[in-house]
Amino acid sequence: MFSTAHAHTKTNGSFTLEKTKAGDVIEIWVLGYDEQVILLTQSHIDSVITIQLESRTMLLDQIVITKKLNAIRHIAKLDLHTSPVNSSQEVLRKIPGLIIGQHAGGGKAEQLFLRGFDIDH
């Protein structure tokens, strides 16, 4: 019989699963890490288990968007992880319809072009 019981980790990574018994299977997965499947034995039940996840490259097929998730937060986190932002100009470049142009030569500010507007300065 398949159980849908689940647990979320605390900030230190620890978690507790209630009503487990020998023979149960635990699936552990988080974005950016290899999935682990553990078949519980009686020794697991009687003691604390330490689980070490191996990091891996994030794949888009790992992301599932449902009503229960805050999809914007998850997508923004993935976007920042895959293309980190190093300056305020890089943040502005992510805005749809905003184009940033650099003047030739130094000492001048960038030109900002916003779709639908005619801005001179």
Image (cartoon, grey):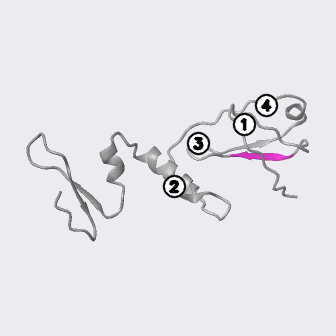
- Determine whether label 1 and label 2 are within 8 Å by CB: no
Q: Is residue 25 magenta?
A: yes
Q: What amino acid type should be assigned to the residue bearing mark 4?
A: Ile
Q: Secondary structure at mark 1?
A: loop
Q: Position of residue 80 (x, y in %)?
A: 45, 46
Q: What amino acid type should be assigned to the residue bearing mark 1?
A: Lys
Q: CA distance from mark 1 to mark 2?
A: 22 Å
Identify the mark nearer the N-term, 1 or 2. Answer: 1
Q: Judge the density around disc 4: few (<14), some (14-19), many (≥20) Cα neighbours within 10 Å.
A: few
Q: Position of residue 83 (x, y in %)?
A: 40, 46
Q: CA distance from mark 4 to mark 1?
A: 15 Å
How many numbered markers are drawn?
Answer: 4
Q: CA distance from mark 4 to mark 3?
A: 18 Å
**Where does the magenta region start and end?**
24-28
Q: Which mark is residue 33?
A: 3
Examine the rendered structure and indicate whether residue 78 appears above or below residue 43. Answer: below
Drawn side of residue 120 relative to residue 50, left or right: left
Q: Judge the density around disc 1: few (<14), some (14-19), many (≥20) Cα neighbours within 10 Å.
A: few
Q: Position of residue 16 (x, y in %)?
A: 82, 38
Identify the mark nearer the N-term, 4 or 3. Answer: 3
Q: Is residue 14 magenta?
A: no
Q: Residue at label 4?
A: 49
Snapshot quadrant of residue 108: top left
Q: Secondary structure at mark 4?
A: loop
Q: Residue at label 1?
A: 10
Front one among 67 and 14 = 67
Q: CA distance from mark 1 to mark 3?
A: 17 Å
Q: Residue at label 2?
A: 75
Quarter of the picture holding the N terminus:
bottom right
Identify the mark nearer the N-term, 2 or 4. Answer: 4
